[in-house]
Every structure is written in structure tokens, then in C-alpha cells.
Image (cartoon, rainbow, N blue to C red):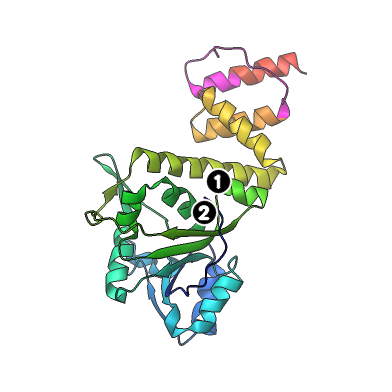
Amino acid sequence: MIAVEMPESTPHWFLLDTPGVPQAGTALPHRFAHARWFWLFEGTEWHALREQGPALIDLRSCPILARACQRDARYWRGLLLISETSASALLAHLRRMLTVGFGAHHRALLSYYNPCTASYFFDACDAGELSRWLGPISQLRWFGGTWADRANGSQGWQRLLNPGLAVSPLAIEEALSPHQKARLQTCLLEHHTWQWCKSTGTDYRTLWSHLQEGLKLGFSERAVLDGWLWLRLQYPQAVPDLPLPGATQKERLERLRNRWQDQHP
């Protein structure tokens, strides 16, 4: 995503990423008691978790919060929306965006309300796809970027304008395009790298390079990939002899570990 300067237009709605910033969700009814807001998961299959899920807030009912969202975007984390449609129509569209399909028998929750996820997902949409996914939303803004941006300290304001093309409405359990799925997979991998960066104090680019190397070696299983990262951090200069022997990913990693331990005692 490309960071932009905040425009002058005033957002109408704020979709608070309560799962990402639960303290803000807790503060909402106390600090802004007169704000008009709705639980996004209300009436969906995630209804039981509605109070832990995102909240859609009408900023026109609370101008103070509108200013706070733009002044302290790291605390009030989420998406700023401009939309002239009714609250019910906007909620219906946002709730339809929650569930996506993967193939014939798989479905998942799309956490597009998370600024990091949004930075990958919407970046993977062409003009027609943006027109469908944004629907009644004319403009979408958020402060953030990718996990790599976060690790590098290069987050900023992002803005999307609805191209407004004549397209069919968003389908129930909309199927993701190959590019969208690839970008979301990158999101998961870069988040995993960021977590390793935070826990080990290792440079993000170094860890990302190690992770990519592990994937090229065939270590795609989560536990095996983590084992590879630990091994590579211990032996940063070692060179794996290809092809790696072993019938399974775990066995190939263990044989590589034993070989490096023998070669570099």
C-alpha cells in the first residue's frame, strides 16, 4: 500500500478493530456514551462473540471521537468510512464481507476491519473488485500498512476511493481471487515473521529471508518451519546440501539439524 496525506473530507463512520485494540472497545461506552454504534457481529454466525468483535460507530453522532480517530490512530485502530447510505444498508454490506469462500467446501472469517489485513486484502483488488467490495462505501481510510511496514516503522495513512464501476453485488460467501488469497497468505507469513522479530530481537529482513529459504526447502508445516527458523538462527552461515534426505518434512529437518551440528560443533 502507498501512504497518503490525510484529506480534508470528514469520515462518516468508524469501524473499530476491537479484537486488535480491546482497550479501546472497553473505553468506547464510557468515554463516548452518546455515540451511536453497532456490533458488527450482531445477528451473524459470530453473534455470541459480538462484544469482542468490531464495532461500527456513527461519527456524526460523536464529532469528538471523529477527531480522536484521526489524532490518535494507533489507539483508535480501525477503518474510517465515507458512505451516504443508511446504517442498515451499510451494516448489511459490511456483514456480507465477513465470510469468504475457499474452494467448494471451505469458508473463513475475513478480518478486513484490521488495518494490517486491509493493507494486504484491498491492495489485491482491481478496480472491478474494489467496486464490489466497497459497495456503498465511497472512500475508505486507515492508518497502518503491512507487517513489514510495521517492522520497518514505515506505517502511514492509506486511502481507497471506490471506482464506482457497474458490477454485480457482493455474493454471499464471496470467493476470493487467486491474487487475494496469495496476498492474505503473505499477510500470515509476514505476521509470523514480525512475531519472531519481536521475540528474538532479530532484524526483520533477516528473518524474512530465512523464512523464504525454509519455504523453498519445502518446510511448509508450521511447526517444521519454526524449527527451521531456530536452526537457521543458530547456524546462519551453514549451507544445506540438496536434495535433503528424509520421507517427511520433520525428518528432513532433523537430518539437516544433525548434519549441521556435526559440521559446526
Question: What x and y, as percent, mark residue 188?
Answer: 50, 43
Q: Looking at the image, can residue 98 be seen? A: no
Residue 190 lies in what quarter of the image? top right
Q: In front here: 50 or 91?
A: 91
| Residue type indicated by callout 2 | Cys
Above/below status of 207 relative to 238 = below
Q: Are marks 1 and 2 in contact (CB under 8 Å)?
A: yes
Q: In front here: 68 or 166?
A: 166
Q: Looking at the image, can residue 68 be seen? A: yes
Q: Which residue appears at 66% of the width and 18% of the height? A: 258
Q: Is residue 241 magenta?
A: yes
Question: What x and y, as percent, mark residue 233?
Answer: 70, 31
Q: Label 1 neighbourhood size at 10 Å, few (<14), some (14-19), many (20+)?
A: some
Alpha carbon distance from label 1 to label 2? 9 Å
Q: Which residue is mark 2?
A: 116
Question: What x and y, as percent, mark residue 37?
Answer: 40, 78
Q: Which residue is mark 1?
A: 191
Residue at the limit of the structure toward the left, as seen here: 168
- Can you say which quadrant of the picture contains the C terminus? top right
Above/below status of 39 relative to 227 = below
Q: Secondary structure at mark 2?
A: helix
Question: What x and y, as percent, mark residue 242?
Answer: 57, 12
| Residue type indicated by callout 1 | His
Residue at the limit of the structure toward the bottom, as seen here: 34
Segment colored magenta: 234-254
Q: Secondary structure at mark 1?
A: helix
